[in-house]
Image (cartoon, helix red, strand yellow):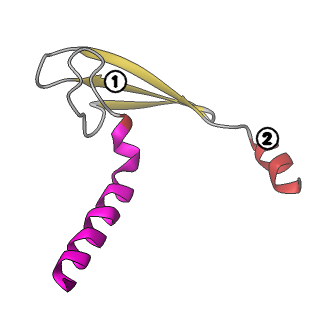
Amino acid sequence: MALHAETAARTRAARTRLATYSKNHCPQCGEWLLAPDWSEYLNERCVRHTWSCQDCGYQFETAVFFASREDDQRAAAA
């Protein structure tokens, strides 16, 4: 019984660590993608990622936009 509880706890911990990776799927075939091929810092609020799927060969780009420092300061003050 203890082994089962320990295994279940490890599984939950692994899922928590991988929660951010659950969004990285190929839009064409659905295969899980570990990391972008290339990341480009565009400015202090934007990073562009280039991805390619090893299974189907599909290539695409995504962009991540971060809040401005003013937005962070307003949120901290609230």
> In this rendering, is residue 26 above or below 69?
above
Mark 2 vs 1, N-terminal side:
1
Residue found at x 26% / y 63%: 11
Kindly give the residue lying farthest to the left in the view shown: 55
Mark number for residue 50?
1
How far across and down, in percent of the image, does residue 9 sit? Answer: 30, 72
How far across and down, in percent of the image, does residue 71 sit? Answer: 79, 41
In the image, what residue type sits under mark 1? Thr
Mark 2 neighbour class, 10 Å CA radius: few under 14, some 14 to 19, many 20 or more: few
Mark 1 neighbour class, 10 Å CA radius: few under 14, some 14 to 19, many 20 or more: some
Q: Quadrant of residue 26?
A: top left
Mostly what secondary structure, the magenta segment?
A: helix
**Circle 2 — which element?**
helix
In the image, what residue type sits under mark 2? Asp
Q: Which residues are magenta?
A: 1-22
Q: Which residue is mark 2?
A: 71
Residue found at x 73% / y 37%: 68
